[in-house]
Amino acid sequence: MTSTIAPVAADAREEGASAPDEWARARGEELLSIERLHHRWKGPKPPVLSNVSLALHPGEVTWIGGRNGVGKTTLLRLAGGILLPQRGSVRMGELTPTAKGGRYQRRIGYLSAGDRGLHARMRVRQQLDYWARLAYVPRARRATLVAAALGHFGLRELAEQRVDRMSMGQRQRIRLAMAFLHEPRLLLLDEPRNSLDDEGYKLLGAQIQRATAAGAAVLWCSPRGEDRVLTCDAGYTLEDGRLERVQ
Amino acid sequence: MRAWCDAMWGIVRRDAILFASYRTQLVSQVVSPVFALAIFYYISHMLGRSFHSPGGYFGYVIVGLVIVEILTLSLGLMPGVVRQELVAGTIERFLVSAHGPVNGILGTMLFPLCNAFFSGFLTLMLAALIFGLPLASTAILAIPVALLGVVAFLPFALLLVSIVMAFKQVAGVSQFIVSAIALVGGLYFPIALLPGWIRWASEVQPFTPATDLMRHLLVNAPLTDSASVELLKLVLFSTVLLPAGFALLRLSIRYGQRTGTVAEY
């Protein structure tokens, strides 16, 4: 059932990083650094993000809350490189989201809000294998990681079933399995608790613990405090384009 | 490179799985060319010997039909496929993956292109086996020319997909382009019949040399220029237009990422 997260030191060596995450954690270095981020949607509205700065450290879980439409998803999309900053910067060490060869994206696991992003007529195993390929998981590790992801989110018995014949909670588990599958160093989770039953929530908690123990950082966004992960190292609310620390 | 190939194969495999999951799709794709072939077979009979080309009008138009089929199944469908990915939120997967959105969208184009290629080949085989089209001994050489033609078509698909990425919709535009190409590319009738003021359009796109070469190789139709000149035109169009197409796609994605509209649909 358990599979080990690739040793971060080896990973860092392979990708030419300057220092392994273990050292970074020991020295309190940042895994993700968001600085003076600014984003404004078209039209005469105030900016949705205004001079937002945030640092995520290896092994930490950070929660961001706030009202609907306040800009949590925009912030996560900017951190994930889906959107590019209009002003300010997003960095993971030396890497920015526009780094060549998808070097930034290899290090992130992203879960969007809602139930989108799945191919309805594919089977669960096919879906995960497809994602592993897009994430450039090496051929030799692909089957192992797909099998592990199925196990970690209680999807083994559903592996050969089509996605469009599943409940919303089961779909959410597949989406979570995809976010964690390639053992990213940074997990960006937008309302991950959506539609999950108690067992699914426990499985998610266990995977977050496992990932942070291996040096990953987690950024969890949800509107309400009670939806946040059980233990988090820092908490913020987003209001009027600014982040305010609440924990 | 290996990871890139694995990801591309993953996308093609995904599209093949989705295509095969709709069972009637393949059947209709195999059966419908028979009707088009039958219509043009009888029109050709009606025209008799008044149309001067090896294999008569049927031999002439069959290449046009194959190319229209390839265009409809590739150029015509691709913007819709990418729009569908936007609506389903699966484009977002490309944006957060190591493979990236440009490679992802290119991968999304591969299965429709392969499918269009297969369908064109099938139409040709049906024309030969059911309607007795005499294929020339050089017909086999049409395969590499067709592949080069596909490379030359790709920039047009990239243009349409870029419009979808930037503005979310190209309803009707792809059909308009396919029809315009059919008109000025000489797919159904010789371009010499076109009025002089529009004939220039036949010279500024890759479809006319591709059609002429294919027709020459498949049914021995005479060429207006030499084969090497036609081939050179095709290579030049591909060399110039393909990088421009990719640059445009990259630009449209970056525009969406900066303005925030990339995830909209």
Image (cartoon, helix red, strand yellow):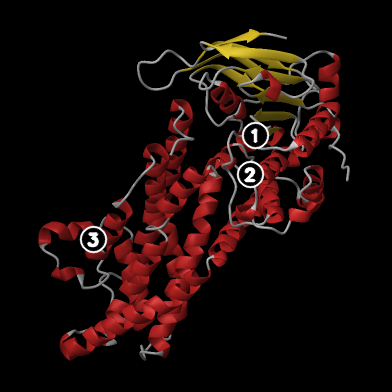
Q: Which residue is mark 1?
A: A194
Residue B138 in sight in this render: no
Q: Name the N-terminal-most of marks 1 and 2.
A: 2
Q: Amino acid at mark 3?
A: Ser
Residue B202, numbered circle: 3
Q: Is residue A45 above or below residue B89?
A: above
Q: Secondary structure at mark 2?
A: helix
Q: Chain of mark 3?
A: B
Which picture quadrant has residue A212?
top right
The amino acid on which the numbered mark 2 sits, given as a three-letter code, is Met
Whether tag 1 and tag 2 are in contact, CB under 8 A, the answer is: yes
Q: Quadrant of residue A5?
A: top right
Mark number, residue A168: 2
- The residue sitting at 11% across, 63% down in the picture is B195
Are labels 3 and 1 on one chain? no
Helix or strand or loop: what does disc 1 sit on? loop
User: Dot 3, crowdedness within 10 Å: few (<14), some or many (≥20)?
Assistant: some
Image coordinates of residue A10 in percent, x first then y, are 85, 34
